[in-house]
Image (cartoon, rainbow, N blue to C red):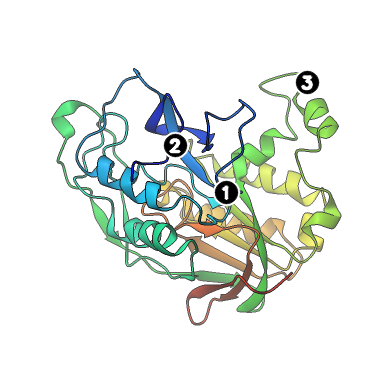
Amino acid sequence: MEACLPSGFEARGDETALLRRDGPAGDGADAVQKGAHLLLRPLGGQGDLVGGEQAALQLVGRAEGRQLPVGDHEDLIADGLHLGQGVGDKEMLPYSLHYFKELIETGRISEIRPSNVWYEERTDFSPKALGTPRVSHANTGFDLLQGNAQFEGEILGGCLESLYDIFDNSLHADSTDLCQKYKLFPDLSDWEGKILLLETSQEKTEPDDFKKMLQTLKETRIFEVISGLLVGKPMDETFYDDYKEALMDTIDSNIPIVYNLNVGHATPRAIVPFEVHAYVDATEQVIRFDYNKES
C-alpha cells in the first residue's frame, strides 16, 4: 500500500498540514482522521526522500483509517529520519521511534514515561555534519515542583511563545484583535478540569520573558481552573533552573506542576495525545491514557 500522502505533496520537516484523502489541506476534501497531522511539502521542493523516510511513509500509509489522536506533534517525523536537509542521524531517535511506532501500529499512545537521556541540539546543519552522532546526557525524569503527584484530565496546550503571541501585538498590530475575534484562545470554561501542557521553543526565551509569558497566561485565570500543569524540558536545558523558579514564583495556586517532560522542541520527544483522558503520576513517573473515559 502506498503512503497516504495527498496528491502533489511529500514529507518535510518544517511545515505542517492536515493529511487529506483527496488533496492538500484547504481544498475542501475530508481529513483522513481528526487530528492526523503530517509534516508535508509540495513536490519539487528541496530535500529528496531517502532511506528510512520511505519506510516511515509506508508506516504512515498503514495508518489510514485509524484514529490518530490530536497531540503535540511538531517535528515528529524529523526526529532523525533525514527529513529536510542537514539532519545527521541515521535512524529515528529510539525514544521517539517507540511512540511513533505505537501510534502508527495501534492508533493510540498508551502511556508516556521519561527518556533515559536527552540530546544536545545541532548547531551544524551542513553536509559535512551528516552521520555525526548527537551528544547525549542522562535525563532526570519528571520533576514535581508543587502540588499533588497524582492528577487527571484531558491535556491541552502547546508552545508557550506561540500561545503568548495570541496576547501580544509585537509582530502585528492587529494580532490580539484578530485572536479575540476568532477565539483562538479557548474560553475559561473550556479549560476547566484540563491539564495544561507548555513547552518552549528553539528561541530559548530569556527567563524574564518566560516569566512575562506565564504572567500573561495567569491573567486569563487559567491557573485557577485547570487540574494541573505539564512543562516540557527546555532545549539544551538552557535556563532549566530559571524556568523552574519562574513557574513556582508566578503560579501561586497549588495546582500540580510537573516539569521536565520529553515533549516539544527538545529531543527526544514523546507524542502527547490531546482530547484523551490522562492520569499523571509523578511518583511512578508515568502518564497513562484512557481512551474509553469521557472527561
- Provide residue 231's location: percent of width, then percent of height: 56, 58
Q: In the rendered view, does 35 fall on the left or right side of 91?
A: right
Q: Label 3 near label 2: C-beta < 8 Å?
A: no
- Mark linked to residue 174: 3
**In the image shown, does 242 or 227 lie closer to the viewer?**
227
Separation of residues labelled 2 and 3 (CA atoms)? 29 Å
Q: In the rendered view, does 189 fall on the left or right side of 213?
A: right
Residue 207: image quadrant is: top right
**In the image shown, does 31 or 152 lie closer to the viewer?**
31
The answer to whether 199 is drawn above or below residue 181 in the figure is below
Residue lying farthest front?
1
Kind of residue sitting beneath label 3? Asp
- Mark linked to residue 39: 2
The residue at the point 47 percent across, 57 percent down is 271
Disc 2 vs disc 3: which is toward the camera?
A: 2
Kind of residue sitting beneath label 2? Leu
Label 3 element class:
loop
Q: Earlier in the sequence, mark 3 or mark 1?
A: 1
Check the picture and name the quadrant holding the C terminus: bottom right
Disc 3 vs disc 1: which is toward the camera?
A: 1
| Residue pointed to by mark 1 | 33
**In the image shown, does 75 or 268 lie closer to the viewer?**
75
Residue 247: image quadrant is: bottom right
- Provide residue 294's location: percent of width, then percent of height: 72, 71
Q: In the rendered view, does 13 fall on the left or right side of 245?
A: left
The residue at the point 67 percent across, 73 percent down is 152
Label 2 element class:
strand
